[in-house]
Image (cartoon, grey):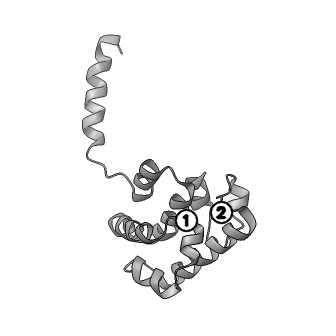
Amino acid sequence: MRNSNIPSVIRILKNVNKRFNIPAVTQISNKSRSPFMVLISCILSLRTKDNITMLASERLFNIAKTPEAMMGLPIKTIEKTIYPVGFYRNKAKVIKNICKELAEKYHSKVPDTIDELLKFKGVGRKTANLVV
């Protein structure tokens, strides 16, 4: 390819890229730059459509943005806030447990290694990779 073609190739790629939706977790990561919000959004996103994940994440982060704030919420409040996310009852419990563990063992900081993240119940390799 000649150097003179590079600008037109870039323009074409940008136009093609606009047709694809950016995943909800990526949007949250880009917007918040918060490993905690990315972790919780990843939990919500499993087996859930992106538009639902985005709305549920926004609702949840409007009432609690930290592990401590999330721990202060009753499970029922988390459930109602994240509904209609798939498996919302189970995910509410997982979120509450992750927040408790983050506060107690990690001083409310999300670990920055995959191995540490995999120790959390409900966090698999995909979620750990997205958070790191």
- Residue with the mark numbered 2: 108
Q: Position of residue 22 (x, y in %)?
A: 36, 51
Looking at the rendered structure, the kind of residue marked 1 is: Thr
117 sits left or right of 58 in the view: right
- Mark 2, Cα crowd under 10 Å, few <14 / some 14-19 / many 20+, is some
Q: Is residue 77 above or below residue 121?
A: below
Name the image quarter holding residue 70.
bottom right
Looking at the rendered structure, the kind of residue marked 2 is: Ser
The dot on residue 40 is none
Q: Residue furthest bottom?
A: 76
* Residue 38 visible: yes
Q: Residue at x 39, y 58 (%)?
A: 24
Badge 2 vs badge 1, beta-carbon distance below 8 Å: yes
Q: Is residue 29 above or below residue 10?
A: below
In the depicted view, which residue is nearer to us: 6 or 113?
113
Q: Position of residue 44 (x, y in %)?
A: 47, 70
In the depicted view, which residue is nearer to us: 5 or 84?
84
Q: Residue at x 73, y 70 (%)?
A: 104
State the quadrant of the N terminus. Answer: top left
Q: Position of residue 115 (x, y in %)?
A: 73, 58
Q: Secondary structure at mark 1?
A: loop
Q: Position of residue 83 (x, y in %)?
A: 39, 80
Q: Residue at x 63, y 72 (%)?
A: 98
- Residue with the mark numbered 1: 66
Name the image quarter holding residue 39.
bottom right
In the depicted view, which residue is nearer to us: 53 or 16?
53
Name the image quarter holding residue 100.
bottom right
